[in-house]
Amino acid sequence: MRTPVIAGNWKLFKNLSETRELLQELAPRVAGVSGVEIIVAPVFTALTTAVQAAMGTTIRVAAQDCFWEEEGAFTGEVAPGLLKDAGCSHVIIGHSERRQYFGETDATVNRKIKAACAAGLTVLFCVGETLAEREAGTTFTVIETQLRTGLAGVTAADLQRLIIAYEPVWAIGTGKTASNEQAQEVHARIRTLLVSLYDQAAADALRILYGGSVKPENIRGLMGQQDIDGALVGGASLKADSFAAIVRFQETE
Ligand SMILES: O=C(CO)COP(=O)(O)O
């Protein structure tokens, strides 16, 4: 049985007081939910505030990116060990917005994943195709390359520190969710690839989240799919009510 994961990627939203406020609103709304891992990913400057606000709850805190070196002359970067030191348990790596706007490549994603695992963080490794790639019929080729390169040198032991998030770029912030079937198809193929890269047991244990316009209204259908083990939520994670409703997907009608 894979424990579902519901993660909120707050992107570049929420200052310190808003971070505190959102977590104070969220905590009572998700208290008592068992069997779901809950993660929020605020901006770097709000991480320690979030860690403090989440103390005593089951909510875990993720960073939205990290660097691959632990220290050195790398102005502006944040090391995985520093995230751990700040109280983060998770880090998002390879989000399509970093690939699109900040020059993230499969090779840098790979270095970051290995460094984050070595620092003892759990990685939310994002993959996904653009609309042009889907329309050209290359969805799975693109994702396979992202996975093969991203996971190069990632050991079976490291894999236990990994969660994959499939986020079709065309579904992010557009209100267009992949259909349950479209998402399931890609998730199943990701799992099959993991069997060939590792083994059946490792692939069976790994959580694969879906991301892209996830809302309280569509989470249940997505979670009903065999290979969908949770969600990476953007917009709907910025409000306590909608994020809590997604976390409580087992209870919605
Ligand atoms: O990018 C996402 C999460 O990382 C998805 O964002 P939306 O839920 O706003 O589409």
Image (cartoon, rainbow, N blue to C red):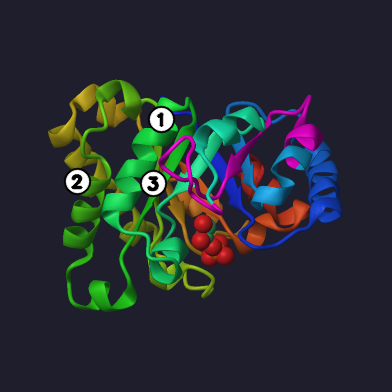
Magenta segment boundaries in residue numbering = 50-76
Which residue type does callout 3 highlight? Answer: Gln
Q: What residue is at 64 percent from the left and 56 percent from the top?
A: 10
Residue 222: give x, y in percent of width and height: 46, 52
Say if 119 sits above or below 50 in the image.
above
Q: Do the residues labelled 1 and 3 touch (CB within 8 Å)?
A: no
Where in the figure is residue 162, as x and y percent of width and height? 39, 34
Q: Does the residue labelled 3 lie within 8 Å of ligand 1?
A: no
- Mark 1 CB near ligand 1 (8 Å cut): no
Rendered residue at 41%/58% (across/down)? 167
The disc, 1 or 2, on the residue closer to the chain's N-terminal end is 1
**Residue assigned mark 2:** 148
Few, some or many residues within 10 Å of mark 3 (<14, 14–19, 20+): some
**Residue to which mark 1 is pinned:** 117
How crowded pointer 2 is (Cα within 10 Å; few <14, some 14-19, many 20+) is rated as some
Marks 1 & 2, CB-CB < 8 Å contact: no
* Observer able to see residue 227: no
Q: Does the magenta-highlighted stretch encompass residue 153?
A: no
Q: How far apart are marks 2 and 3 (CA)?
A: 24 Å
Res 104 visible:
yes
Q: Which mark is residue 149?
A: none
Provide the residue designation for mark 3.
Answer: 225
Which secondary structure, mark 2? helix
Q: Which amino acid does label 2 sit on?
A: Arg
Q: How far apart are marks 1 and 2 (CA)?
A: 17 Å
C-alpha separation, residue under disc 1 versus residue under disc 3: 28 Å
- Residue furthest to the left: 196
Q: Is residue 44 positioned above or below 195 on the image?
A: below
Q: Which secondary structure is most common in the magenta stretch?
A: loop
In the image, taking residue 164 as reference, residue 21 lies left or right, namely right
Identified at 19% across, 46% down, the residue is: 148
